[in-house]
Image (tube, rainbow, N blue to C red):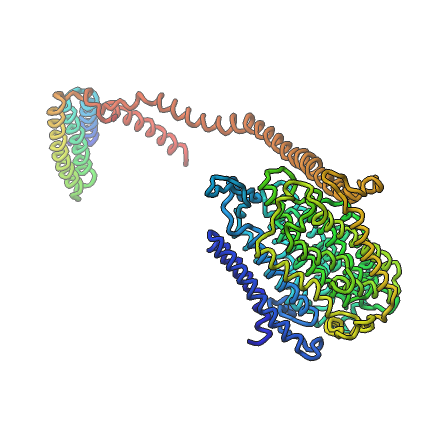
């Protein structure tokens, strides 16, 4: 059986890739994708810990399901925001969307 | 109506007239004088009823009309106010009512009622005359109506109220109230023509001089109240126990008894009010007022009030008096009275203003009364007070009539002369017969012309008292004063009425209207007849044919009825000689004064004449001793030294020191520390903000990096902290 640490390393790698995507990509949609990656790496963590440490309970799976739901909702809101921004400003480049400072 | 109630109401009509005239009717001259004269008439009527009821009362001295009510409480006792008509106040009421009414009627004429308005008359100045044009086209000047006609009647109404209040009062407190009301009114009326600087000065002088006496009198009243707990006449002056206690208590000052101390203090009030030496200076200056006012002040009311008060207080003044041994207040009164009588009689000799002669003669006659009281002549003083009130009111009103006639002449001829200077008159007897005859009667009464005039009987009684009680010095001084009185009276009559006119104005003088001559005639009747009630029983030939009613009646005011002095020929002959001699001398010296001539006495008397003319330089002396130091005190000392130097100096010093402290605090505390720290906080925040500005780029990814870096940093920190702590 594959040891737990492999899963954890994989999850960490995935999180790092997602984080890089969030920090480095210009496209707002790509940033959203990065966020999805980070969320899913967490899901892998959760499921892996459940399977290896507490397989009797159901809480690991339940967490994962809730994270899915939240991620889906978040994407929906995020995309809606991005579309709205695009319509108003004609761009979805994260650098140009600097209205937070006002 | 009960007599007591009637007495309460006596002072009321003039007061009401005062308020009505001041508040409502002051625009209507006729209505104003109708109200005032009507009020005087009402009071006169009431007074006559009271007087008649009083003289019908048997043993009136023991059972006078009296009534009192508590006014306001003072601790355990209360000030009582009330009314009292006893023999003394009854006779006083009699002459006050008559003279006041006469003066009111006279004022209508004196203030030129019925004459046109003046061409250039201003309120505050005497009327200057109006120009009339008759049907032939001739224009001539006639007297004009007084511009402040209603105001005059309001003031004399208030004056009459004060006098009535004083007379009917049964205690020293309301007496003092009436006394002060008259003080105010004399101030207002002496300065009636307030636009004249001399009138303003005279009003202030009169007010302040009488005030000096009043303060002492008030102290005396307060002292009396503290000693006895009452101010009622009957409880003090008609009560042997109280008088005895007061006479035996020591005041602790100069070895005087309480009675003597109070008596002297009260008497100083009289010195001020009745213009005795040394407070006599205000009275001649009071001649600045209109002539009815002079009559009011000098005859009917104010100066009489002073004498009335000491006559009233006589039991107190004489407490401890035994025959031949006067009490201290009596000695003081005898001295001041006799001295004043002679002193002002000498001044009167050298005065040329017709009213000023009368003013000094008033002072002299008041001195007579005071001296009479000082030697124990209670009845004689009261008698002279009454006869003097009549003939002096007559003389003043007569002189006003003369001045009026002269003013008419002055307006007619356009001469610029003083209508009050006797040297501008002469020969007026033909122009103004009524005034002449009444003035002659008044003058003869004043000089004590034997037998027919009132002045003779009262003056004779005073001289008889002085002789009978053995006060030879007083007797001689008073006899001399009487001689001078007769002399200057005849001088006045001769210069004014006899001889030939000395000016054009005197040639064109005119008899005054009936409103002015009627009071003269009525007062002339009293100037003769008022003496008949007090003819001594032992008088040769006519004595006893008329009972000496006055002595019995007024003597009843006292607990111990005073004995009439035994008759002696010496005072009688003296008074005959001085009166007739003085009159003859006056006529001889002055009968041939021609126009523009100097006073015949000027050359023989020389510097003495100048001294008399200048009234012994008392005005100048007081100016040097009191007025100038007062000015110096207020100007140099109080204003320049105390106020400007010391008080302002302290203030300036305080301001200077405060300014130094303030500058120091500002430069070393406020600016660097308070402002500095404030600025530092503000600037620091600004700089910090400017420095941190770049962090807030608005870019999500940068924020994210910052968050990550911080997270990492904190993680390291916490890791380090957690790992090191056990």
Q: Residue furthest front?
A: B136
Position of B595 relative to B370 (above/below): above
Position of B126 relative to B14 (above/below): above
Q: Residue B272's x, y, as percent?
A: 72, 54
Q: Residue B199's x, y, as percent?
A: 63, 44
Residue B338 seen by the camera:
no
Q: Residue at x 50, y 29 (%)?
A: B674
Q: Residue B585's x, y, as percent?
A: 81, 51
Q: Residue at x 11, y 33 (%)?
A: A76
Front residue of this view, candidates B274 and A4: B274
User: Number of labelled discs?
Assistant: 0
Position of B354 relative to B695 (above/below): below
Q: Residue B478's x, y, as percent?
A: 83, 57
B249 left or right of A78 in image: right
B241 left or right of B132 in image: right
Res. A62 image quadrant: top left
Q: Residue furthest bottom?
A: B58
Front residue of this view, candidates B409 and B527: B409
Residue B245 seen by the camera:
yes
Res. B385 image quadrant: bottom right
Front residue of this view, candidates B4 and B152: B152
Quarter of the image where the C terminus of chain B is located: top left
Quarter of the image where the N terminus of chain B is located: bottom right
Front residue of this view, candidates B563 and B69: B563
């Amino acid at each position: 059986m594959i040891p737990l640490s492999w899963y954890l390393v994989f999850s960490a790698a995935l999180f790092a890739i997602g984080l890089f995507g969030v920090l480095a990509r210009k496209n707002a949609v790509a940033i959203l994708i990065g966020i999805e990656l980070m969320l899913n790496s967490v899901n892998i963590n959760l499921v892996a810990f459940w399977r290896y440490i507490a397989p009797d309970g159901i809480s690991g799976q339940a967490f994962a399901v809730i994270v899915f739901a939240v991620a889906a909702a978040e994407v929906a809101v995020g995309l809606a925001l991005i579309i709205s921004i695009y319509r108003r400003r004609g761009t979805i480049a994260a650098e140009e969307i600097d209205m937070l400072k006002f | 109506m009960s007599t007591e109630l009637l007495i309460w109401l006596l002072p009321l009509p003039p007061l009401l007239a005062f308020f009505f005239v001041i508040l409502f009717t002051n625009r209507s001259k006729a209505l104003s004088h109708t109200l005032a004269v009507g009020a005087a008439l009402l009071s006169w009527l009431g007074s006559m009823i009271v007087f008649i009821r009083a003289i019908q009362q048997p043993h009136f001295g023991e059972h006078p009309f009296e009534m009192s009510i508590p006014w306001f409480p003072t601790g355990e006792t209360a000030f009582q106010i009330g009314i009292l008509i006893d023999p003394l106040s009854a006779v006083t009421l009699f002459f006050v009512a008559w003279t006041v009414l006469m003066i009111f009627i006279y004022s209508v004429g004196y203030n030129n009622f019925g004459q046109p308005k003046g061409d250039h008359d201003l309120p505050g100045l005497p009327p200057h005359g109006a120009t009339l044009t008759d049907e032939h086209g001739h224009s001539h000047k006639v007297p004009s109506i007084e511009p402040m006609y209603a105001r005059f009647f309001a003031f004399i109404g208030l004056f009459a109220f004060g006098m009535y209040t004083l007379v009917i009062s049964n205690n020293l407190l309301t007496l003092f109230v009436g006394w002060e009301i008259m003080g105010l009114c004399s101030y207002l009326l002496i300065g009636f023509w307030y636009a004249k600087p001399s009138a303003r000065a005279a009003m202030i002088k009169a007010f302040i001089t009488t005030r000096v006496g009043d303060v002492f009198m008030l102290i005396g009243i307060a002292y009396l109240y503290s000693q006895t707990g009452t101010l009622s006449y009957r409880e003090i002056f008609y009560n042997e126990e109280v008088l005895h206690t007061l006479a035996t208590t020591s005041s602790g000052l100069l070895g005087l008894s309480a009675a003597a101390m109070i008596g002297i203090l009260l008497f100083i009030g009289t010195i001020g009010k009745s213009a005795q030496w040394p407070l006599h200076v205000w009275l001649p200056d009071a001649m600045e007022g209109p002539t009815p006012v002079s009559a009011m002040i000098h005859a009917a009311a104010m100066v009489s009030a002073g004498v009335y008060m000491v006559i009233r207080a006589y039991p107190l003044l004489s407490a401890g008096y035994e025959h031949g041994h006067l009490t201290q207040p009596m000695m003081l009164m005898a001295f001041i009275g006799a001295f004043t009588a002679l002193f002002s009689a000498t001044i009167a000799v050298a005065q040329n203003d017709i009213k000023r002669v009368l003013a000094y003669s008033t002072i002299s006659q008041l001195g007579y009364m005071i001296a009479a009281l000082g030697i124990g002549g209670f009845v004689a003083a009261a008698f002279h007070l009454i006869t003097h009130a009549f003939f002096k009111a007559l003389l003043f009103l007569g002189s006003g009539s003369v001045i009026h006639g002269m003013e008419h002449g002055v307006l007619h001829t356009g001469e610029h002369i003083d209508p009050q200077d006797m040297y501008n008159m002469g020969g007026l007897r033909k122009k103004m017969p009524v005034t002449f005859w009444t003035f002659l009667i008044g003058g003869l009464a004043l000089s004590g012309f034997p037998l027919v005039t009132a002045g003779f009987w009262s003056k004779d009684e005073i001289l008889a008292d002085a002789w009978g009680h053995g006060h030879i010095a007083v007797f001689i001084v008073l006899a001399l004063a009487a001689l001078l009185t007769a002399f200057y009276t005849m001088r006045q009559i001769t210069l004014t009425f006899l001889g030939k006119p000395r000016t054009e104005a005197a040639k064109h003088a005119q008899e005054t209207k009936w409103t002015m001559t009627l009071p003269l005639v009525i007062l002339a009747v009293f100037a003769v007849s008022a003496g008949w009630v007090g003819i001594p029983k032992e008088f040769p030939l006519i004595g006893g044919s008329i009972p000496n009613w006055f002595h019995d009646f007024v003597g009843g005011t006292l607990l111990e009825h005073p004995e009439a002095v035994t008759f002696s020929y010496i005072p009688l002959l003296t008074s005959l000689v001085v009166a007739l001699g003085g009159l003859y001398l006056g006529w001889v010296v002055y009968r041939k004064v021609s126009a523009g001539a100097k006073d015949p006495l000027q050359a023989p008397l020389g510097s003495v004449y100048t001294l008399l003319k200048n009234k012994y330089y008392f005005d100048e002396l007081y100016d040097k001793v009191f007025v100038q130091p007062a000015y110096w005190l207020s100007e140099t000392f109080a204003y320049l030294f105390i106020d400007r130097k010391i008080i302002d100096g302290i203030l300036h010093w305080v301001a200077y020191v405060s300014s130094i402290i303030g500058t120091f605090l500002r430069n070393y505390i406020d600016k660097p520390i308070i402002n500095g720290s404030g600025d530092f906080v503000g600037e620091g925040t600004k700089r910090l903000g400017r420095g941190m500005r770049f962090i807030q780029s608005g870019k999500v990814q940068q924020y994210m990096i910052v968050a990550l870096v911080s997270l990492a940093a904190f993680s390291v920190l916490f890791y380090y902290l957690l790992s090191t702590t056990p």
